[in-house]
Structures are given as C-alpha cells and as structure tokens.
Image (spheres, coloured by chain):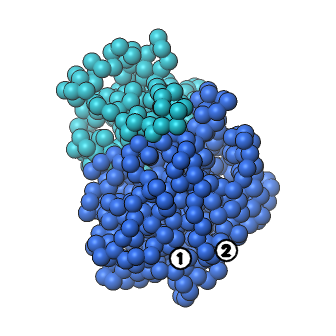
Chain colours: A blue, B cyan
Amino acid sequence: MSSAFVRATALASALGPGLDAASGRLFGQPVPPQTLIGWPYRAIPVEDTDWRRRAQTIALAVAADLRGRAGLPAWRWAGLPCLLGSSSFSIGASEGEDPALERPSDFCRALAQCFGAGGPVIAMSTACTSGLSALHAALDMVREGSFSDVLVLGVEFSNRLTVAGFAGLELLSRTCARPCDRERDGMVLGEALGAVLVSSAPAEWRVSALAAGLDGASVTGPAPGGEAMAATMRSAMSQARWRPGTVDLIKLQAAGSPLSDLAEARAVRALFKPAPRLVSLKGAIGHTLGASGPAELALLLGALARGRVPPTWGYEVHDEEIGLAPSGGAAGELRRVLFNVSGFGGSVMTLALERSG
Amino acid sequence: MLLLAPTLVSLTRAELADAVRARFGSELRRLGVFTQLAQVGAQACLEACATGGRLGVLLATEHGSLTATRAALDGGLRRGEPVMPSTFIATQTSLAGALLARRSQDVARAACVFLEAQDWPWLLRIARSWLAECERVAVGCVHEAAQGEAHRSHWCIFVRQAAAPAIHCEPAGAGAAATTSDWIARVAAWRDAPDGPLELRGNQQAWRFTSRQSSA
C-alpha cells in the first residue's frame, strides 16, 4: 500500500472565496455572522441571486486556486477522479425558481467539470462527515495504486431547508457559535466548498490514518460519554502508530453545541493526559456540515503554513465541565495533528496528519 | 471477495407499511419512505445469511429520499418556518447505518452513495476496500419510486471468507451491460441457475461472478 499526501487544498468559505485571504482573516478580529431566514449564518461573500450561477462562480474560483497550487499538467486533470461529499447537494436550487429535484450525481458532475476533472465522479453522503467519507474513499484509491491523484470536494451551499431543519431540532444558536465556551448555546451553520487533492507524490502533509466509527446512541447526537469519538481517535493513533503523548494538536469537531462539545471533550480527556493544543474552526466559518472535512482541512493547513495555530473564534470563558481550553499562537515544531469530524447518523471520523520530512 | 444472500425487496407504496410491520413488529416512526425501504431490505438480507462481526453499510441510490424532501420543501419552509424535526430527519439518506446499529448490529462504517446508473461497479470496489476494516459489508441499491411504480430495495453482503456456499467476485475484462438498478437482481437470477460465470459491466469496469465451488 502506498502512502497518501495532501498535494494541494483550496477553499471558499465565509472568510472569503480564496484560501490565502481566509487564512489571514482567521487570525484577525472575529466578525459576526450574517443571517439566513432569521438565523445566524456564515455565508460565502459572493453575491448573485441565481443559485446555480453563484455556485458555479464559487466553484470556478476554488478550482482556479487549486489548479494553481497543485501543479498538475492539464492531461492529468482530464482523467482525474472526483469524490464529492455533501449533505444538501443542490437542494438550494429547488427552493427558488427551479423546483425540480436534481439528481445529486448531476450536480456533482457539473462541479467536477468546473475543476476540469474528467474521470469518474462519486458522490457520498454521510451527513456532516460526507467530505471526510469522500476523502476516505480517495485515500483507498491512492493507497491501492488505482490512481496517483484524486480530487476530493466537500460542498455545502446556502439553502433554507437545512437551516430550517436544524432550527426545528433546536440545535442553532441565536447569536454566534462558541465552541467549548461556558456560554455556548448551539451551532451556527455555514456554507463552504473545500477542495483537497490527494496524491501518492510526497508533499508537506502525509495522511497517516483515517479512522471511521459509528455512534448508534441517537441519529442526531453522540452518546454523552463520547465513547465512539474516543474509540475513533484511538483507532487513528493506532493505525498511525502514534502514542497520545506525541500528538501536537487536535482540530476539534466542537461546533458550540452544549452536549456534543461536552461529549467530545470527555473523549479527549479520556485519551490525553494532559490534552494537546486544541482548535475549533466552526466559530469562524460556521458548521459547514458535509463540507466541513475538506473545508476545515484546507483552512487549518493554510493557517499552519503561516507558522501559527489559529485562534478559536467564540471561545472566551472556560467551562469547568468541558475542562479544555483551545489556544492559538505560534505553531513551533508542530508535526502531528488529529482532526475530528462527526455528524448526524452517528458517523464519527478522525484523520491523522503528519508533517513529512 | 465473496457475495452472499442477494436479496430483492420490491414493494408498492401501499405494501411498504405492512412489510415494515411484518419485519420489525411495529411502525418505524419518524422515518421517511426511503429510510424505511433501506431498513426493510437490509434487515431481510442480514437475516438471510448467518454472518457476524463488524458491519459496513453501503447504500446506493440515484435520487435519494424524494417524498420526504418534497414534503419538507412544500411545507412550512415556503413561509420561513422551522421544518418539523421528523420531517427534516426523514430527508437524511445516511441514517441506515445508525438505525441498523440500534438494532444490535455491530456497524463500523456506513455511507450513502449517489450513483449514476452505469457506475454500480464502484460499489464493489468500495466494499472491497471496506473489507480491510469490516468483516462484512452490506451493499444496497434503494429506489424510492414515483406514484404507481414499485419501490425497490436490493441488497447483498460481501465477505472475505464464508463457510456457506457463496459467489466469488473478481474484476473482469468485459461483461454484459448492467445498471445500479438491476445488477443484484441479475446476480440473484444467475445464482438460481448458474451456467458458467456471470460477467457484468458498468461504465468502464466489469466484474465476474462465479460460484465458489467452480472457482476453487
């Protein structure tokens, strides 16, 4: 089995349609979210009243950024497979003038074409872990030697159905997301298109493991003790042959939810004594659901490329019950990162990333 | 890789509720048509073969949960109201794994894959990868039909080894054209009267199916 590396990433998020600018803004002063149907929402700052045209504009911007960073010759893109994760696909287009429900595979093929990826297209949905599920399948393809490069997209574009659904479940904050904070009162949703080019060619970050698990406690939330998340982190470290004491940073799932943040904190505290440095990115770009894996991976690696761990927007007041304190600042000799994502349907995933060389 | 228990469930809209009650002893409350179809088919398949161990659940569909999604779009959303929790949950196609886990299955991985009709061979490739972590992978192709047509929930199980008679699967160079809708049905029909290997293709991939005895 070959190793797999992150060859290039790109991102459109509430921090902007480009990764470099977004990484910079992440270190700046937090800004409040916009709103969608009356709820706080982290929208990509691209204006267009036509849903499909706006989606294409965003996709083409991310594609241009990714292709510029990847350095692949044009002929390699022509046969490149594209694995795509989303929970809502193009449902936003069906809320307006175009009420027909489009096949998700058609939407995904159109997105892949924006990137010039002419190989097979596979769309996966595992709710909030959809993007990492797509990455998981891409890693399998690269490690088996089927393909040397695979494009992974995580996409979640603005739609009222998802916001209304989460509002109905009483999972949203009325103000902003405060991951791990004592005053946290729910999540804020967001939109993003995250792109990750996975490759067998050595690059700065190697994917040492990606572990998946399933928490059957409830279809909408984790077991209170965070046992599935702990098991998945333990599995990722075991696959990567890491000891807990060698992990430098954990990118938390934490979205500002009272119970889910606590369950993840219990999982971290059960495995790590003391906990390594921690960061959550959902205060800055919102919970981007199926896009969150590739989107947060792109944002985190973009921030670390600046030599710093980003701050956790919304975290201000320590919570004794959580017992964890996310902290930004100089990255120093940071080499090993665990990256947690979990979601509806009990899906839990942990990615283990190691700086190579 | 071995294939077990190709299971074909086909139900009209009126038959689904009875099938759910017959299989599970009660209604599956809060779940949409798509998820109920997936549960009925998966459970029938799992009961048809005595396998155990960590389970992967790979669910393929072309359109997903049509009824629930249309209901959510046509409901209070137009008036800017919250969508009822059960309505929203019913739109989620990726619940099959969690629901099977709640029925005492040891589910390790689960995903819903949206595939075009010719792309079914990817299911076998993904299942083969998952067998590195799972002892068995249940693969289902679920189609929630429009009014007047029959719903379809076709399932099979892939394992690395099996004590019972099984169907051996391996990549092939060519085969007859098959689709996501019919490949499990064609394997099931061939299993009942095998006449040499069955070779099926979709897009640019083909798979050969042989009875385990003939491939030994």
Q: Residue furthest left?
A: B25
Q: Is residue B1 above or below residue A254?
A: above
What element does badge 1 sit on?
loop
Asked if labels 1 and 2 touch by Cβ distance under 8 angstroms, the answer is no
Query: Circle 2 marks a residue in which chain?
Result: A
Q: Residue B97 appears at what percent x and percent y?
A: 35, 43
Q: Amino acid at mark 2?
A: Gly
Q: Is residue A253 above or below residue B78?
A: below
Front residue of this view, candidates B181 and B22: B22
Front residue of this view, candidates B89 and A268: B89
**Residue A277 in view:** yes
Q: Residue A189 appears at what percent x and percent y?
A: 52, 54
Q: Residue A11 appears at what percent x and percent y?
A: 65, 61
Q: N-terminal of the two: label 2 or label 1?
A: 2
**Residue underneath mark 1:** A311
Q: Residue drawn 54% across and 88% down?
A: A333
Q: Which quadrant of the structure image shows residue B27?
A: top left
Circle 2 packing at 10 Å, graded few (<14), some (14-19), many (20+), is some
Circle 1 packing at 10 Å, graded few (<14), some (14-19), many (20+), is many
Q: Residue A92 appears at what percent x and percent y?
A: 60, 39
Distance between the Cα atoms at labels 2 and 1?
12 Å
* Mark drawn on residue A24: 2
What element does badge 2 sit on?
helix
Q: Amino acid at mark 1?
A: Pro
Query: Circle 1 marks a residue in which chain?
Result: A
